[in-house]
Amino acid sequence: MIPTIMRNDSDDFFGKSLNQFQRFLRQSGPAAGAAYTLMGSILFLGALGFFLDQYFNTSPVLLLLGLGLGIVVGFYELAKTIFKK
């Protein structure tokens, strides 16, 4: 005869907690993605503007242009995520 394993309340609590955590991650995924897109676009385009300023010796012009474009692109992507539904 095969012994049966008794299921206790701590296993059920762990399963419910894991399901709750997975649901939380699924719901917060789009917000996290939008935040990473906002930060990434500002940092990437700002860095690109900085290095182009160094290459063309144009001081802060391309850096400011890159930062401004990064902010516009980042907030556009953020708005697409927020107003998706």
Image: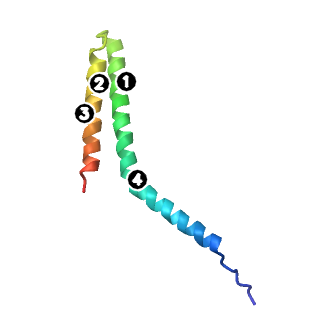
Give the quadrant of residue 9: bottom right
Give the quadrant of residue 56: top left
Determine the secondary structure under disc 2.
Answer: helix
Which residue sits at x=56%, y=68%? Answer: 15
Q: CA distance from mark 4 to mark 2?
A: 29 Å
Q: CA distance from mark 1 to mark 2?
A: 8 Å
Ranked by sequence position, the earlier of labels 4 and 1 is 4
In front of the other: 16 or 77: 16
Q: How many numbered markers are drawn?
A: 4
Q: Amino acid at mark 2?
A: Gly
In front of the other: 2 or 83: 83
Vertically, is 78 above or below 12?
above
Q: Which residue is mark 3?
A: 72
Determine the secondary structure under disc 1.
Answer: helix
Q: Quadrant of the N terminus?
A: bottom right
Residue 69 image point, x, y percent: 26, 29
Q: Amino acid at mark 1?
A: Ala
Ranked by sequence position, the earlier of labels 4 and 2 is 4
Q: CA distance from mark 3 to mark 4?
A: 23 Å
Which residue sits at x=37%, y=24%? Answer: 47
